[in-house]
Image: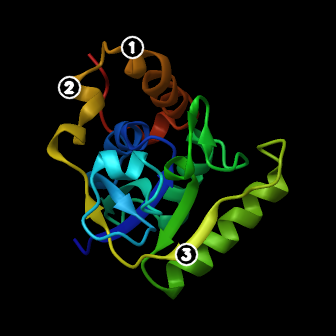
Amino acid sequence: MAEELATLGGGCFWCLEAVYLDLKGVTRVMSGYAGGHVANPSYEAVCGKKTGHAEVVQIAFDPAELSYADLLRVFFTIHDPTTQDRQGNDAGPQYRSIILTHDDAQRATAESVVAEIAAAKLWPGKIVTQLVPLEKFWPAEAEHHNYFARNPWSGYCQAVVAPKVQKFKKSFADRVKRVAV
């Protein structure tokens, strides 16, 4: 299997990680930081809004089972790409909608999917998702990995993460790789 990587930010990385871990074709997901100018950022520094980084996930996937375009279609379903530096009550540049492309082919595909989503009018406003080349991905601290699975009953997970996971499972039922017990 020739694995590919995708790097996406659409609000809190716990939400995206929880969804993509359940998507058929995804082999692993790592929460982290990208898109900024500070080396080796910490969660506290990123939340301090001076690093330029967004909370992102880096997704390893099998392109024979899941296309990059379909991975992006899930992305545009599970977060609001029309709000600048915000997802729900999470506000700040670290929560911006961003696609960090790994090569020119990903950029072309992302541009095409953004145009498709805009034309379909899935969201009431203009898509503000940033589309930039990935320079460096910084893995998040261990406590952020697999957060939803380890903390499903926390208030944030119940109020924010769980509804996004449920929306994904409803919208892409044929793409869910495992059934919650």
- Tell me the amino acid under the disc marked 1: Gly
Residue 177 in the figure: left or right of residue 126: left
Q: With respect to residue 75, does 132 lie above or below?
A: below
Q: Residues within 10 Å of mark 3 (few under 14, many from 20)?
A: few
For label 2, the crowd category at 10 Å Cα-Cα, with few meaning under 14, some 14 to 19 and many 20 or more, is few
Q: Residue furthest bottom?
A: 104
Marks 1/2: CA–CA distance: 13 Å
Mark pair 3, 2: CA separation: 32 Å
- Image point 33% across, 74% down: which residue? 136
**Drawn side of residue 60 relative to residue 55, left or right:** left
Q: Position of residue 33 (x, y in %)?
A: 35, 58
- Going from N to C along the chain, the mark reached first, 3 or 2, is 3
Pointer 1 residue: 155
Image coordinates for residue 93, horizontal then vertical, percent: 55, 52
Q: Badge 1: how crowded within 10 Å, few (<14), some, or many (20+)? A: few
Mark with earlier residue (3, 1)? 3
Label placed on residue 132: 3
Identified by mark 2, the residue type is: Arg
Q: Quadrant of residue 15?
A: top left
Residue nearest the observer in this picture, 159 or 60:
159
Give me the residue at 24% from left, 40% from top.
Answer: 144
Which image quadrant for residue 128? bottom right
Verify CB contact (< 8 Å) between mark 3 and mark 1: no
Residue 113 higher or lower than 29, as above or below: below
Q: Which mark is residue 150?
A: 2
Q: Name the residue located 78 percent from the left edge and 43 percent from the top edge.
A: 123
Give the structural element (helix, strand or loop) at label 1.
helix
Q: Amino acid at mark 3?
A: Val
Which element carries disc 2, helix, strand or loop?
helix
